[in-house]
Amino acid sequence: MATREKGEHRVAAQPGFVLHSYPYKETSLIVDVFTRDYGRIPLVAKGAKRPNSKLRGVLQTFQPLSVSWSGKSEVRTLTSAEWVGGLLPLEKSALLCGFYLNELLVKLLAREDAHAALFDHYITTLNQLAHDEPAPIVLRKFERALLKETGVAGDFTRCNDSGKQVEPEQAYVVDPERGPRIARASDHWPAVSGKTLLDMEREDYGDAATQAQSKNLMRFLLAHHLGGMQLNTRQILIDLMQL
């Protein structure tokens, strides 16, 4: 629920997750929160670093929260945060995968750009990671959903230049700005089979070739849309798990 009073924007009991936080002044934090109806919002959590602060133990990553805030500046003031529960904690490699998801959201989502479907997909992804579902498949599904929801990845079932249906046995490349087209000998982009593109569109990653090709394709597409920004957690995942 949101209200406006004398130019001040107030939002109450909004579902959200902490993506990232960093110190602000002596006792406070700036918290980057991913919310269902308002997207990614920066909030100042006043006094959150104090030992007796109610916020100190609540503002944890990967835990469903109900957050409220107010203010009219770019960085608003967190007025309350309550733990909602319902998700298992992430552990070991799943925890690192969770930080990778958060880094993607921080770097690819514009502030205050709401994506309710992506928010729900994020919850599903955290739940799958917590239950030890195969991380490569879980991450590919989320990466694809993120690019689709933010409008930078279209339909993988049709060629962008001809409009023809993608054929399973044909080799394709995916133009980061336009979508799939038939691969050429001169291409420097990663080539994938039409079957891989069709599998990705229906979220079917059972084929080992689809898993391998989709990994290279998503790494290429994400690098393009990140515009040169490095993903610190991705490199760690590559080194440790070849994801």
Image (spheres, grey):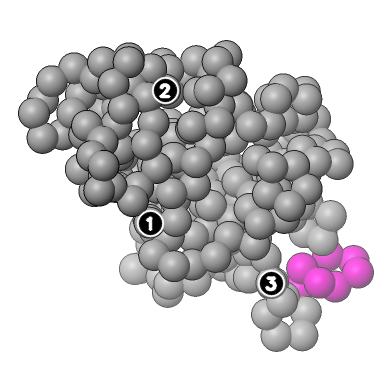
In the rendered structure, the answer to whether residue 37 lies left or right of residue 53 reads left
Relative to 193, 160 lies left or right? left
The residue under the point 35% across, 47% down is 189
Q: Which residue is disc 1 drawn over?
A: 224
Q: Point out the image quarter for the N terminus.
A: top left
Residue reaching furthest to the front: 185
Q: Specify few, some or many for label 1: CA neighbours under 10 Å numbering under 14, 14-19, or 20 or more.
A: some
- Which residue is denoted by mark 3 in the rendering? 22
Residue 195, by quadrant, is top left
Local SS, label 1: helix
Residue kind at label 1, given as amino acid type: His
Residue at 37% x, 36% y: name it. 191
Task: Using the rendered view, name the quadrant where residue 86 is placed.
Answer: top right
Residue 79 horizontal/vertical position (percent) = 62, 60
Disc 3 from disc 2: Cα separation:
40 Å
> Which badge, 3 or 2, is on the more N-terminal residue?
3
Secondary-structure class at tag 2 = helix
Residue 1 shows in this picture? no
The amino acid on which the numbered mark 2 sits, given as a three-letter code, is: Thr
Q: Left or right: 12 with respect to 37?
A: right
What whole-number distance in Å separates the C-alpha atoms at marks 1 and 3?
A: 27 Å
Say whether disc 1 or disc 3 marks the residue closer to the N-terminus.
3
Residue at the spot of label 2: 196
